[in-house]
Image (tube, rainbow, N blue to C red):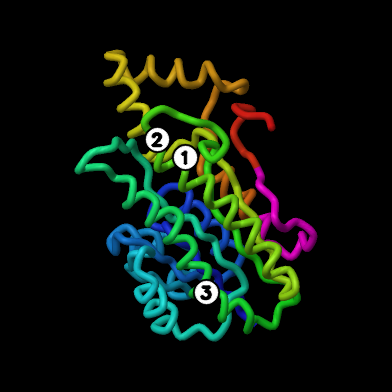
Amino acid sequence: MEKSIVVTGAGHGIGRAIAKILADQGFSLLLLGRNRTHLESARDSLKNPSSHQSFSCDIRQAEQIREALSGSGVQSLYAVVANAGIGGENHYSKEDSWQEIIDTNLTGTYNTIQECLPFLKKSPENYRKIVITSSILARLGVPGYSAYCASKSGLLGLMRSLAAELASDKILVNAICPGWVNTQMAQDGLQGFAEALNISKEDAYKQAMAQVPLEKMSEPEEIAQLVSFLISDAQTSITGQTLDINNGAMMP
């Protein structure tokens, strides 16, 4: 029986890399994200693109996720990769992006999982999987990133609660905390770092990597490999866990 998986934030970066590896493994994917053009480009790049569907939706709006699932025609889900999120600084003011970041990263992930749960529970598989993309900034404080740090920390609490709640349904819930990953979000962060210090982007990269024992970023494909393992049939014992993948930047 074909196994279907929802991947949010699938149009670029880590989400797109996750979609590629899962498609290569023969899963049928439902790609969700805000930008239809990016989603369709991601779908067209996958193995057997006609086996996958893409839906433009805002995960802050639960009804849009519900409509996407209904429109897909799937009867059950094997896994959900709740990867969608936004970054950036926030500062207390009329233009503070606090609410947007919290609503997207934390509430949006909650909405995604809750709307997908009925489909996960209908799956005939012995174990079903949920993987949440958090961040190293769930564990570290960074000036100016209060909303991002709070939202990503909140995801770890959400993950643990759901793992305990859904264990009796054999739905395993875990979170990953990537450090620096070579994505557009990371490149934008480096550019902001460079501008704040009035240095080149190359020097900003060197300074950032000086704090990382392996002195490098991860590639999105490496993160995708970890997610692939977590949702695979090879593992039925990991749940309620946070897995750090950060080149040694933080060692709890």
Label 2 environment density (alpha carbons within 10 Å; few <14, some 14–19, many ≥20):
some
Residue 171: x, y in percent? 68, 69
Q: Is the magenta stretch mostly helix, strand or loop?
A: loop
Q: Which amino acid does label 1 sit on?
A: Cys
The residue drawn where x is 26% and y is 42% is 96
- Disc 2 to disc 1: CB gap under 8 Å: yes
The residue drawn where x is 49% and y is 37% is 181
Residue 19: x, y in percent? 50, 59
Q: Mark 1 points at which residue?
A: 149
* Front of the two marks 2 and 3: 2
Q: Which amino acid does label 3 sit on?
A: Cys
The residue drawn where x is 23% and y is 39% is 93
Front residue of 213/19: it is 213
* Quarter of the rendering occupied by the N terminus: bottom right
Q: Name the residue under label 2.
A: 145
Residue 237: x, y in percent? 79, 59
Label 3 environment density (alpha carbons within 10 Å; few <14, some 14–19, many ≥20):
many
Front residue of 220/161: it is 161
The residue drawn where x is 54% and y is 61% is 81
